[in-house]
Image: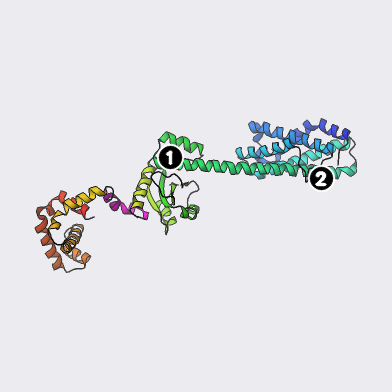
Amino acid sequence: MALQPLVAEAMRGDLRRTGTEVVAAIVAEVPDYRDAFAGPMGATIEQAVALALDGFLELAGRGIEPEGQQAIETVVEGAYRLGQGEVRSGRSMEALLAAYRVGARVAWRSLAGRGVAAGLPAEQVAAFAELVFAYIDQLSAASAAGHADELENSGRVRQRLLERLARQLLAGSPEATVEVAARRAEWSLPTTLTAVVLPTSQVRGVLPALSSATLVAVEDLPGVDDPEAAVLVVPDVHRAVLLRALEGRRAVVGPTVGWREVSGSYQRALRARALEVVGDTDAELPRLVLAADRQALADLRARALAPLAEVRESTADKLGETLRAWLLCRGRREQVAELLHVHPQTVRYRVGRLRELFGDDLDDPERVLELVLALG
């Protein structure tokens, strides 16, 4: 259907008023747009309305039906950009589609009324309505495509920013650097953070049980060469809840610390992982302390346990086991016997032999500390 030139010209002369009515109706009927026209996006939306109306009249005047064909390229491109802009403004596609529906209704009523007054035949009014709504459907589709593309793109960009933030936290980057990165990623710095090292394959199964603000890092991990390792940086979580969520998985949980100290939580989790510790590192503190400097521990053992080198290896093993139990039980013979599953008289004999080998060292607090660490 092609509009008669006089009808089209009459409608075009009324476009400004029609555009104003469309904008007013959208503001009144779509809550998400009540404040939109007050900001920079308002001018963009008003321009898009004017461009869409002008493009429609050009199509209608040329007798081109938009359904199944491409509308004027600039109008479609404008609708696509409008969809992108709505994502940046924080509005949903549902709000934009509602605006399109309201705009189509108001534009149809205004243009049709002007067209009938200018001589649009009654039998063509229905065809004109179909033309209006087919045109709006095409613009809606272009805006939906722009909205979806921008949403996907912005999601990827933010994900990269969050991953970079996670690596900066784990690496112990300067506080100011982390704060800037957090703002860019739109991530609120929490009170506490907990680093969790686990296999990449287990990340997806864990995340639903954790806060949506949990950061995930799977590439370029500081101090890690294993491509199968991933790190979760979990904000403000109750430790018992976190441990339950990770139960049954090969996860190593660092201590819960202030966000500025999370690199320390990460480093402890890595040390525990190297020792094949799984689960809560807080429950393995003695083991982690003893393994902090392996060579120092070996030297300490060699010095502290040197007297045992004077006896046969099998005897040294039994005496070392007894000495450890005796120190842990603070000399209580019955408890030592129960712990070692031997007779108390055996314990008495072995302790006597130990006193022969170690002498006064067993009564010296400094030497006793060395023995406890060496036998730990």
* Magenta extent: 278-293
Q: Earlier in the sequence, mark 2 or mark 1?
A: 2
Secondary structure at numbered mark 2:
helix
Q: How would you rate the neighbour count of disc 2 (Cα within 10 Å): few for under 14, some for 14-19, many for 20 or more? A: some
Secondary structure at numbered mark 1:
helix
Placement of 77 over or under 355, stated as above or below: above
Which label number is shown at residue 110? none
- Whether residue 267 is visible, yes or no, is yes
- Residue at mark 1: 168
The secondary structure making up most of the magenta span is helix
- Residue at mark 2: 130
- Whether residue 95 is visible, yes or no, is no
Residue 354 appears left or right of 208: left
- Alpha carbons under labels 2 and 1: distance apart: 57 Å
Residue 325 appears left or right of 47: left
Residue 72 inside the magenta-drawn segment: no
**Nearer to us: label 2 or label 1:** 1
Q: Which quadrant is the N terminus positioned in?
A: top right
From the viewer's side, name the closer residue of 53 and 241.
53
Residue 52 on image: x %, y %? 75, 36
- Seen at 11% across and 61% down, the residue is 353
From the viewer's side, name the closer residue of 334 and 224.
224
Residue 283 inside the magenta-drawn segment: yes
Q: Quadrant of residue 116?
A: top right
- Seen at 75% across and 34% down, the residue is 19
